Amino acid sequence: MEPTLTTSHALTDSRATTSLKNTPMIKLSEIEKVYQTDTIETVALNRVNLTINRGEFVSIMGPSGCGKSTLLSLMGLLDEPTSGTIEIDGRPVTSYSDKELAKVRNHKIGFIFQSFHLINDLSVLDNVELPLLYRAGMGGKERRQRALAALEKVGLSARTKHFPSQLSGGQRQRVAIARALAGAPEIILADEPTGNLDSVMGEEIMELLLTLHREANTTIVMVTHDESMALKTERVIRFFDGSQVS
Ligand SMILES: Nc1ncnc2c1ncn2[C@@H]1O[C@H](COP(=O)(O)OP(=O)(O)O)[C@@H](O)[C@H]1O
Ligand SMILES: [Mg+2]
């Protein structure tokens, strides 16, 4: 089924006040990430300096183990660097309280993973509503409305009562995208979003991300192994062994 894409103001209105292009949205300075296990120290990122501008669609490529997922988890504030600074929207992450950080993660950033990360016991609609439960002051009616609008956007209005196991891989990834979209994030971080999909479904997901970028000016950082997908984005950043090489 072709995803039908519609513009929903419920999902895009936060953009109206923040439409300045070419200002840094995510800025990494001298980022180092070292994982310490019993005996082994792994330098996953080595002095990375990288700026993603507001509204940019950037792809990140590089061999397995070169630090791409680590980079995304730092950008998404899911982990902290060993050294270096991260600024989101011009503000150093270290200046946020834990409460503010949780809010930024939940409001500003949407994650899409290779393996979808859906909850199998919940319906499609409940999966999409789930992150909104953590929004202070948002009632059930608004949650429902946002989730339905997001599912409409990814062309899954007819599947709201299905469970993930009843969907194809491409449909599951579209649910995961709807879940990210329901929160109207300014930033989408996608870690190999088409990695588990065949080329036709992968293509569909890529078109969806391109449309989101175009319609809602969402800042998107996508890790991919697929050169043809990467070339559809505005900038390709290549990593090797923990460092940016081009
Ligand atoms: N939680 C962790 N503990 C220890 N080492 C890790 C951890 N996560 C990643 N690494 C190591 O850091 C390096 C970069 O990993 P990752 O960011 O997942 O790379 P990529 O996503 O490019 O495949 C690899 O050598 C990996 O083994
Ligand atoms: Mg990875």
Image (cartoon, grey):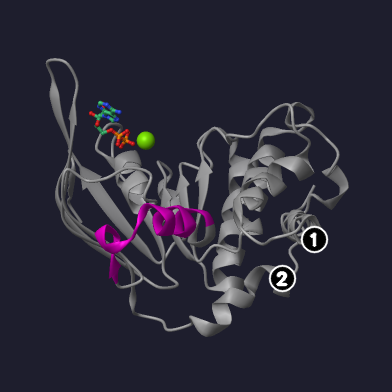
Q: Is residue 188 visible?
A: no
Does the closest atom of ligand 2 sit within 8 Å of the Cβ of label 1? no
Q: Quadrant of the C terminus?
A: bottom left
Residue type of the residue flagged with mark 2: Ala
Q: Is residue 59 visible?
A: yes
Does the closest atom of ligand 2 sit within 8 Å of the Cβ of label 2? no
Residue occupying the point 76% across, 33% down: 167
Q: Position of residue 45 (x, y in %)?
A: 18, 42
Residue type of the residue flagged with mark 1: Gln
Residue 99 marker = none
- Tag 2 near tag 1, CB within 8 Å: yes
Residue occupying the point 51% across, 48% down: 111
Q: Position of residue 59 (x, y in %)?
A: 38, 55
State the CA–CA distance, disc 2 to disc 1.
Answer: 8 Å
Q: Is residue 188 above or below residue 227?
A: below
Q: Is residue 216 above or below residue 111?
A: below
Task: State which image quarter holds ligand 1.
Answer: top left
Q: Pointer 1: what residue?
A: 145
Q: Pointer 2: what residue?
A: 10
Dot 1, crowdedness within 10 Å: few (<14), some or many (≥20)?
some
Q: Secondary structure at mark 1?
A: helix
Mark 2 or mark 1: which comes first in sequence? 2
Q: Position of residue 56 (x, y in %)?
A: 41, 69
Considering depth in this image, is 90 or 181 the residue closer to the camera? Answer: 90
Residue occupying the point 44% across, 62% down: 233
Q: Position of residue 159 (x, y in %)?
A: 84, 43
Residue numbers of the magenta segment: 91-106
Q: Secondary structure at mark 2?
A: helix
Answer whether residue 237 is magenta in the image: no
Considering depth in this image, is 193 or 107 the residue closer to the camera? Answer: 107
Answer with the quarter of the image where residue 21 lies. Answer: bottom left
Answer whether residue 101 is magenta in the image: yes
